[in-house]
Image (spheres, helix red, strand yellow):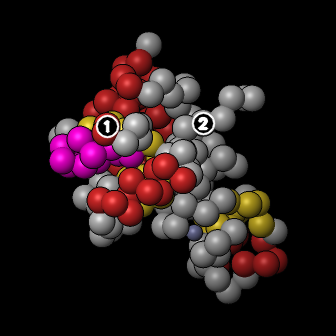
Amino acid sequence: MSIQKPSFVVDAMLGNLAKKLRILGYDSKYFSSIEDDKIISIAKNEKRIILTKDEQLTKIAEKQNVSFVLIRGSDELEQILQINVKIKLDRFVVDTDNSRCIVCNGKLEVVEKYRIIGKIPEGVLERERKFWMCDSCKKVYWEGTHFEKLQEFATKLNDRIN
Ligand SMILES: [Zn+2]
């Protein structure tokens, strides 16, 4: 894995897509409200690819030589496949060691159990073996029951690109 993964700046209205990309390990900045010129300058300064549903914005991006993908529809699986047509993405994996915080895009770091006592439900603390903490907003993660669903999502994606 020597090639760096692409990173994104995700336009308002595409919050669910940003979450999925973060889970899949893609550095994805997202703002629930953002001006067009701000999103262009972030893309330029941080070499991020713009993901947007706004055709007007893609025209500005094109003029300024900023990479973008025009996203259509509301299904995240289809949306990620649309990105993959233009920007070749790696085989999809859900690996919490490489995931980003779904809330703030921070990096997740493995955290010892004793450091999160009182911060998560006791039952979870007893049941789960491995925990991660966001290095920015400090949200605690564990793989739990939703993890299987996410793995299924990645498998579906891989089936569609093969
Ligand atoms: Zn966070």
Q: Residue at x 32, y 67 (%)?
A: 34
Q: Residues within 10 Å of mark 2 (few under 14, many from 20)?
A: few
Residue 8 image label: none
Residue range of the region highlighted in magenta in the rendering: 50-61
Residue 101 percent coordinates (x, y): 56, 61
**Residue 77: percent from left, percent from top:** 33, 36
Determine which quarter of the picture holds residue 61.
top left
Residue name at image x 44 percent, y 28 percent? 87
Which residue sits at x=41%, y=18%? 161
Q: Which residue is mark 1?
A: 62
The answer to whether residue 52 is magenta is: yes
In this view, 123 is above or below 89? below
Q: Real-space Cα distance between discs 1 and 2?
A: 22 Å
Residue 147 appears anywhere in the view: no
Residue that protrudes farthest toward the front in the picture: 63
| Left-right relation of 142 to 40 | right
Residue, far top: 162
For image coordinates 31% across by 37% down, the residue present is 62
Q: Secondary structure at mark 1?
A: helix
- Identify the residue under disc 2: 5
The answer to whether one can see residue 66 in this image is yes
- Whether residue 148 is in magenta: the answer is no
The quarter in which the N terminus is drawn is top right
| Front residue (pair 38, 138) | 38
Query: Mark 1 packing: few (<14 Cα in 10 Å), some, or many (20+)?
Result: few
